[in-house]
Amino acid sequence: MLESYVVDASVVAKWFNTGEAYEKEARNLRDAWISGKLHLRAPSMLPFEVANSIWKNPNISTKVARSLVRLVIRLSPDLMNPREEDSEQAMLLARRTKLTFYDSIYLTLAKSLSSILVTADDEQLSASNGYTKAVHIASIKKLER
């Protein structure tokens, strides 16, 4: 059985925006997923967050952005809509930790799937303590085994 991870927009955005920290590690994760070495999942909002990061990037022309946003859809991990219970838990987590609701959804999905969240977001990683397992993208080599 393949190892399965939840991946957030802070990681997937690095697949499309160049020059970012941990870009190589994020692309290694993508390549491992594409080659079938592991399974990636994410909340259904992920493409919108990643597309927004492309839109905000001043180094990407409109023409290139149009192509990239198509790739975002094509290369998105398996997308899942949050269950009612997950959304409720995400709201509680967001209120308790001061993390945004949408960042909390990633953690809640990882918890409900008994999976590990892969993130490049230090606040999200910190909020995972005592809630669910999460790793920073910097430790991607540990995931590739």
Image (cartoon, rainbow, N blue to C red):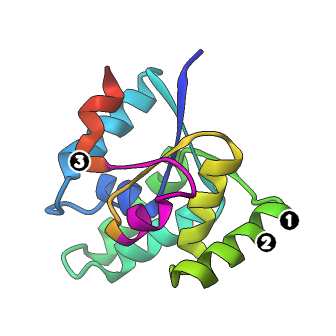
Sequence order check: which comes first, mark 3 or mark 1?
1
Residue under pointer 2? 88
Magenta region: 123-136
Label 2: how many Cα within 10 Å (few below 14, some 14–19, many 20+): some
Q: What is the number of the mark on residue 84?
A: 1
Q: Is mark 1 on a helix, strand or loop?
A: helix
Q: Mark 3 points at which residue?
A: 138
Viewer-proximal residue among 71 and 26: 26
Q: Which of disc 3 and disc 2 is earlier in sequence?
A: 2
Asked if 141 appears above or below 107 in the picture, the reply is above
Q: Distance between the residues labelled 3 and 1?
A: 32 Å
Please state the total of marks drawn on the protein image.
Answer: 3
| 145 is within the stretch colored magenta | no
| Residue 36 located left or right of residue 102 | left
Looking at the image, which residue is at 31% across and 20% down?
Answer: 145
Q: Residue at x 21, y 52 (%)?
A: 23
